[in-house]
Image (cartoon, rainbow, N blue to C red):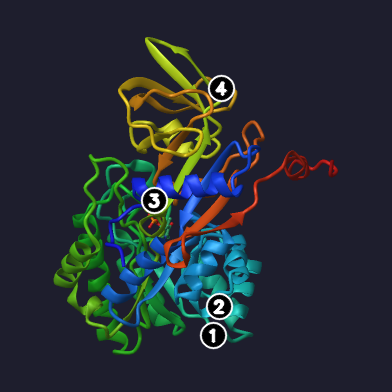
Amino acid sequence: MRAWGDRVDEAQIEGALIKALGSGVVAESDRAVVFHDMCLLRDRLQHLQSEFPPRTLHAVAIKANPIVAILRALVEQGAGLEAASLEETALALAAGCPPERIVFDSPAKTVAELHEALRLGFVLNVDNFAELARIDEILATSSTASLIGLRVNPMVGAGSIGITSVADGGSKFGVRIDIERDAIFEAFARYDWLRGLHMHVGSQGCDLDLFVRAASVIEDLYTEITRRFGAERVAFVDIGGGLPVEYTAADKPPSLTEFLAAMSAAVPSLFDGKVRLITEFGRAVHSGCGFAASRVEYVKGFADHELAVIHLGADMFMRPVYLPEQWKHRFLVCDCHGRIKRGARKRYTIGGPLCFAGDLVARDLELPAIEPGDFVVVRDVGAYTVSMWSRHCSRGLPKVVGFDADRDNALQVLLRPETPADVVQFWGGAEL
Ligand SMILES: *Cc1c(COP(=O)(O)O)cnc(C)c1O
C-alpha cells in the first residue's frame, strides 16, 4: 500500500500515458484526457479505514469527484458518500451506495427533498432551525430509519482561502455556537429524533489548529448533550472534510497520522471509539490520484516568453484560472508518444482554449521546450476539476480513464468524452 500523502508519480504518469496512446484508449481525436489511479484511490480509503476508530463511516464528498465508476470503487470498499444536493444522492444510489451510508448535507433542502431523504433513510445533516421544524412536521405522520444531526458553525475563524472557509462569522452554513448555543440544547430537548452533531471547517487552506479548535467546540457540545439527555443520545459526530493536500512544494499539509494524533489528544472522547464518527473527506481522497494530459495545439509568442495553447482551460480549472494566487498545480511536458521531456527549460504561460483573455491555466512557468503535438500534463486533478466542469464556450467534457496497478495497469474508460451532439442536447437542441 502506498503512503497516505503519495501522489501519482512521474513514472506512473509516463507509463499510463504511453500505454493509453499505444493501445488506442486515447485516440487521435481526444484533445485532452483525464486519468485516475484506482489503486491509489483504494489505498487512500484504506488508510482512513485503518487509522480512524473502527466504526467510522467515511462518507467521501461527491462534489470533489462525481464520476459514478469512481464512486462505485469507493462504495465497494465500504465507503459512504456525502451528497451536497439531491442529484448527488442519486449519483450515490447509482454507484450502489446503501442509503444508510449516504450523508445528505445540502443547505437548501426542500420539503420534497426532505420527504425523499427520510423515506430512503439517508443520514441527514440539518443546516438550521427552520429545517428542523420541517422535519418534525414530516415525522409527525411518518417514521424514518434516517439518523439526523445538526450542523454547527464552531466559529473558530477562516483558513487562508476565504471562499472555501466555513467556520467564521461570514459562513452561510449551520447554526452558530457563539449566539445559538442555548437554542441547540433546546432543539435536542424538543426533538427526540435529533441524534447527531456535524461540523465542517472548510476545504484546503485550513491548518490543523483550526480543526482541533473546531472539534473541541463539538466535543464540548457532545459532553453537555450526553450529560443532559443521556449517554446514548448522540448517535454520531460528523467531523466533515477539509483535510488539505499538497499541490505545490509550498504546501505543507499534515499527514493523516499527524491529524489523528492531534485530534485524539485534543478531543479524546470523540476518538475513543464510543461515539460513531463520520468523515466527509473529498479532496484528500481524490486529488493526488488524478492527472490531466492535454495535447498542445499551438506555441506562440506571449509577452516576453511563449504561450502554449492547450485544450483545458477555465472549463476544467475554474479555481486556478480565476484565483491564480490561491490555486496552483504542478506541470510536466511529454512528447507525442507520452515520454516525459527533461531538456533545458524555458518560460511558458499555459493558455486554455476558451475565448476570453483571462483563460490562462498557469503563468510564467519554467518547463522543457514545448512543441505542438506534445502533451502538457497537469498534476493533482483528481478533485474539484472535472467535477467543476463549466459550459462556458460549450466544449465537451474530456474522456476520463482509470488505471490500476493491482490489475496489471489495466486501462478502463470511466467516462466517455462528450461529443458536439451531447453539447447540443445539453443546450436544448435536437440530436444532430
Ligand atoms: C465540500 C465539503 C466537504 C468536502 O471537503 P474536502 O475539502 O473535499 O474534504 C465535506 N463536507 C461538506 C459539508 C462540504 O461542504
Q: What residue is pinned by disc 2?
A: 99
At which x and y percent is residue 383? Answer: 44, 51
Q: For marks 1 and 2, give the CA distance.
A: 10 Å
Amino acid type, residue under disc 2 in the picture: Pro
Q: Is label 3 within 8 A of ligand 1 (CB to nearest ligand atom)? A: no
Question: Helix or strand or loop: what does disc 1 sit on?
Answer: loop
Labels 4 and 3: the sequence-earlier one: 3
Q: In which quarter of the image is ligand 1?
A: bottom left
Task: Decide if residue 128 is in sight here.
Answer: no
Frontmost residue, 16 versus 245: 16
> Is disc 1 in contact with disc 2, using a CB cutoff of under 8 Å?
yes
Q: What residue is pinned by disc 4?
A: 356
Decide if residue 141 is on the left or right side of residue 149.
right
Question: Helix or strand or loop: what does disc 3 sit on?
Answer: helix
Q: For marks 4 and 3, give the CA distance.
A: 34 Å
At which x and y percent is residue 358? Answer: 49, 23
Amino acid type, residue under disc 3 in the picture: Gln
Badge 1: residue crowd in 10 Å (few <14, some 14–19, many ≥20): some
Q: For marks 1 and 4, give the CA distance.
A: 50 Å
Q: Which mark is residue 145?
A: 1
> Is disc 4 in contact with disc 2, using a CB cutoff of under 8 Å?
no
- Which mark is nearer the camera, 1 or 2? 2
| Image quarter of residue 138 | bottom right
| Image quarter of residue 186 | bottom left
Numbered marks: total? 4
Which residue is depicted at the point 30% across and 56% down? 6
